[in-house]
DNA sequence: TATATATTCAAACAAATGTTTGAATCGCAT
DNA sequence: ATGCGATTCAAACATTTGTTTGAATATATA
């Protein structure tokens, strides 16, 4: 029956698909490539998942599990410390090398951002929303309770931009300043800089009406 | 001879190609679509340009003309004023509606950033480099002449990130905070905010070692 | 006008790719 | 061992897409 439907092939397909989708994006990924890496027949994707689109959905559910995120900062700490802790955690997630699944997660996220599909909603909900909630909580603590919504929104957006920056513009920076060291080689510097810059920016927009 | 090689078809192809490449990106664009809009035969692209790739190169040369950029700020103004002028000009270029070719320019740039091709070098050189040079000049004036290279690079990168932010993350923000007004409807607010945030950030990283 | 050159066009080609098919094979319960 | 559903597989299919072809047409030159 359905007891043990040869988990091997299905799992191998899923693992290969994560790799390929993260590597090349949905469009450029081919089911032949995926099946090749999984040592499975071309028809396997359709048999086990029902098609390329359905396989992609399965990959997203695997890569962005539900209820995985907990606040990484403690509300009893100072807002500045919380911001540092939050940004440090985020930076390591995004830029640390060799953290397999986590890196693939952001790679897939990045590809969806560049070319949104119907599944971007799902990814935002699972990957971005909880982190955005925590950041907004921290920014609110820094800017104060009476901060206009517009300034809150801009400021949160700004800090996200500072963090995602190198993820998005790496190809540009590579060409603009080739001698620049990679973020990964000076992570602490990078984090420290972004924290300073963010705090400075936040204080500036708080003081002015 | 080569005197008047029916400029109409060739130009129509180029115009249609700019539209389609800006709209869908190189991969998703089809020569059939382009030829259709130009009311030309499918073979026209190959006849007039030699192929899809060559057409794309021709589009880039059209969209990113040489020696077009002049510093938009005046070195005799205060650095803060220069930063404001620079960011205002950049924001209007990027976000102002209905500025046809300029918008298409940034759309193509964005697509190349998301999926770099061999032509990204060219685009960076024509579109980014001169603006990056001016920004670096301004940032240097704010941070002072003895600023370490690392801090200069991070800071310039930060400010670029703040400006490109909404261009890159629009699909995310649409889903995160759907009620948020578009940047285009409050351009002055947006520019003012980014200027304040940037200046605050720059001052913060200047003071700390 | 006549000739040559440039341009257009419908059709076909070749390659890539997601999907389907139907037979062969496997695993297991009876 | 036998039979049956689940799984694998090679092959083929259908569609899309960039490109080529060769004839037809237009344009310019002499």
Image (cartoon, coloured by chain):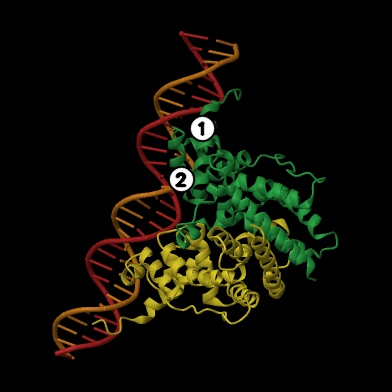
Chain colours: A green, B yellow, C orange, D red
Where does residue B139 sit, x and y in percent of width and height?
59, 69
- Residue toward you, B154 or B99: B154
Q: Report the chain holding disc 1.
A: A
Quadrant for residue D23, please give it.
Answer: bottom left
Image quadrant holding the C terminus of chain A, namely bottom right
| In this picture, residue D10 sits left or right of residue A95 | left
- Mark 2 or 1 closer to N-term? 1
Query: Which structural element holds mark 2?
Result: loop
Instruction: Find disc 1 in the rendering and name its residue.
Output: A12
Residue D29 % position (x, y): 19, 88
Viewer can see residue B37: no
Closer to us: D25 or A105: A105
Instruction: Identify the residue at horizontal 51%, vertical 32% (top origin).
Output: A12
In this view, the residue in front, D11 or B203, is B203
Q: Which residue is drawn at 50% across and 66% down?
A: B108
- The answer to which of B132 and A10 lies nearer the viewer is B132
Q: Does mark 1 fall on the same chain as mark 2? A: yes
Counting labels gives 2
Q: Taking D28 as reference, is C20 above or below it?
A: above
**Disc 1 secondary structure class:** helix
Residue of label 2: A30
Between the residue at mark 2 and the residue at mark 1, the CA separation in whole angstroms equals 15 Å
Q: How crowded is mark 1: few (under 14 residues within 10 Å), some or many (20 or more)?
A: some
Chain for disc number 2:
A
Q: Residue B110, image x and y in percent?
A: 53, 63
């Amino acid at each position: 029956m359905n007891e043990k439907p040869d988990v091997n092939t299905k799992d191998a397909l899923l693992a290969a698909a994560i790799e390929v989708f993260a590597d090349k994006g949905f469009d450029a990924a081919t089911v032949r490539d995926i099946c090749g890496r999984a040592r499975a027949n071309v028809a396997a994707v359709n048999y086990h998942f029902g098609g390329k689109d359905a396989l992609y959905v399965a990959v997203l559910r695997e890569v962005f599990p539900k209820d995985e995120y907990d606040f990484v900062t403690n509300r009893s700490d100072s807002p500045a410390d919380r911001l540092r802790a939050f940004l440090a955690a985020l930076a390591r997630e995004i830029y640390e090398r060799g953290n397999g699944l986590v890196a693939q997660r952001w790679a897939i996220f990045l590809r969806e951002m560049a070319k949104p599909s119907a599944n971007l909603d799902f990814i935002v909900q699972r990957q971005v929303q909880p982190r955005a909630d925590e950041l907004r909580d921290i920014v609110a603590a820094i800017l104060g309770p009476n901060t206009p919504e517009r300034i809150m929104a801009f400021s949160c957006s700004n800090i996200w931009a500072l963090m995602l920056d190198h993820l998005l513009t790496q190809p540009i920076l590579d060409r603009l300043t080739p001698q620049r060291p990679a973020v990964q080689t000076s992570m602490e510097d990078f984090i420290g800089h972004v924290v300073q810059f963010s705090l400075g920016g936040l204080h500036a927009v708080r003081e002015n009406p």
